[in-house]
């Protein structure tokens, strides 16, 4: 359904463009076509260079063994951490490099940040900051995770002998 909605949006946009070409006639058509082609090329470059996280899953993780913990409180309390996709990251490199400033990083320390990264919710401490869906490249600022949150399943199901 989402794919059909996106395709119909592209079709309606192109029909509007064709309508504009018909209205302005052949005099300005070359200029309009060049403008549209340049804009389309910029969009394609942008989509390739900065892909969005929605529906893409998590970032590539290091293959070496990682410390497994049951709570973020098991880590050094003098440092600030965040959790994304059940992996724990240290926030110190991000405080210096986050484009919106260290205040946002301070507001999400020691919290799970999936909802902020995907642009679903604003920070409770800074509701005036607009929602923003981050790119894959933005997660490189976090670096590699330092631990994995080992979540114990609440219900694992029944075996065939129990049924």
Image: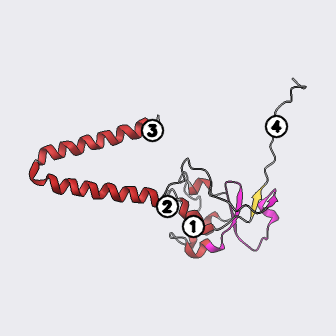
Determine the secondary structure under disc 1: helix
Mark toward the start of the polypeptide (4 vs 2): 2
Q: Disc 2 on helix, strand or loop?
A: loop
> x, y percentage for residue 58?
62, 54
Q: Earlier in the sequence, mark 2 or mark 1?
A: 1
| The stretch drawn in magenta includes residue 79 | yes
Q: Does residue 22 lie above or below 80 as drawn?
A: above
CA gap, disc 4 to disc 2? 41 Å
Q: In the image, 53: left or right of 26?
A: right
Q: Residues within 10 Å of mark 1 (few under 14, many from 20)?
A: some
- Expressed as whole percent of the image width and height from the top left, the position of residue 37 reads 27, 55
For the residue pair 36 and 89, the one nearer the viewer reads as: 36
Q: Nearer the viewer, residue 163 or 38?
A: 38
Q: Which residues are magenta?
A: 67-93
Q: Residue at x 57, y 57 (%)?
A: 117
Of marks 3 and 1, which one's residue comes earlier in the chain?
3
The answer to the question of whether label 3 and label 2 lie on touching residues, with beta carbons closer than 8 A, is no
């Amino acid at each position: 359904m989402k794919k059909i909605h996106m395709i119909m949006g592209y079709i309606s946009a192109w029909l509007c463009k064709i309508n504009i070409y018909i209205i302005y006639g052949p005099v300005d058509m070359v200029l309009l076509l060049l403008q549209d082609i340049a804009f389309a090329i910029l969009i394609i470059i942008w989509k390739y260079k900065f892909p969005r996280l929605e529906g893409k899953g998590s970032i590539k993780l290091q293959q070496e063994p990682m410390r497994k913990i049951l709570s973020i409180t098991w880590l050094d309390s003098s440092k600030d951490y965040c959790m994304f996709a059940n992996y724990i990251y240290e926030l110190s490199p991000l405080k210096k490099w986050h484009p919106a400033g260290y205040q946002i990083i301070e507001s999400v320390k020691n919290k799970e940040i999936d909802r902020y990264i995907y642009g679903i919710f604003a920070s409770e401490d800074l509701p005036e900051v607009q929602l923003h869906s981050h790119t894959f490249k933005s997660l490189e600022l976090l670096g590699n995770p330092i631990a994995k949150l080992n979540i114990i399943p609440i219900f694992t199901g029944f075996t065939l002998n129990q049924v």
